[in-house]
Amino acid sequence: MPVRSVCVFCGASTGVNPAYREAAIALGQAIAQRGLTLVYGGGAVGLMGIVADAAMAAGGEVIGIIPQALKDAEVGHSGLTRLEVVDGMHARKARMAELSDAFVALPGGLGTLEELFEVWTWGQLGYHAKPLGLLDVNGFYSKLGSFLDHVVEEGFVRPQHRAMLRLADSPAELLDAMDSYQAPVLPKWVDKKPD
């Protein structure tokens, strides 16, 4: 399936390292320059606002999805191609997934990780065959990658499912990997009860 839209999960903070801001700008620009639509959480703050502003400034289409409660707190972005207001966080994630052909996580906190792991789980279960990846800014995700390798070694994740999550240092490398993604086709993996 060709990638026409990319969902970006990222922090409502900019973090402490200026490299995170630079990576968000580079990713927003790269998405727009490839003619892709950016789908994201609709915020005007932190890396969320930066990636959206960069894509808009580069002439891209940007769709934000934000829960009413967060929009009411005045963190909704008013300068997007389209801002959709939904009832809550579950509706937000479902709508972002519906509109997106691929998923990328920039550095972020608990919300970013939760969104990433949920959409990855959906892929593992066969609910979608969309690529997902991490933009590994200054090694931000390297320790997570080591932990995920440990989870595989301990028998809780198949190597093929671990390989679904691409890791790259640059937006171009990550978006190229999205274009060549092939979802694994595996039988369901559940432990059987002993007889």
Image: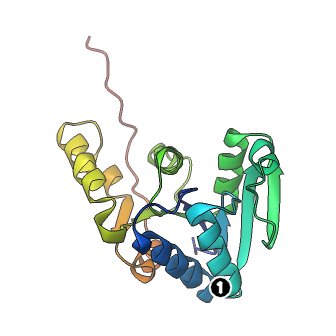
- Looking at the image, which is closer to me, 150 or 11? 11
Left or right: where 39 falls relative to 24: right
The quarter of the picture where the C terminus appears is: top left
Task: State the image quarter where residue 174 is shown.
Answer: bottom left
* Residue position marked by numbered label 1 in the rendering: 35
Residue at 52 percent of width and 73 percent of height: 24
Residue at 58 percent of width and 56 percent of height: 12
Count of numbered labels shown in the rendering: 1
Type of the residue with mark 1: Gly
- Looking at the image, which is closer to me, 73 or 107? 73
Query: How many residues crowd mark 1 within 10 Å: few (<14), some (14–19), many (20+)?
Result: some
- Is residue 91 in view? yes
Left or right: where 32 falls relative to 140: right
Q: Position of residue 47 (x, y in %)?
A: 56, 65
Q: Is residue 4 above or below residue 162?
A: below
- Looking at the image, which is closer to me, 185 or 129? 129
Q: Position of residue 40 (x, y in %)?
A: 65, 62
Circle 1: element type: loop
Q: Residue furthest top?
A: 195
Residue at 64 percent of width and 63 percent of height: 100
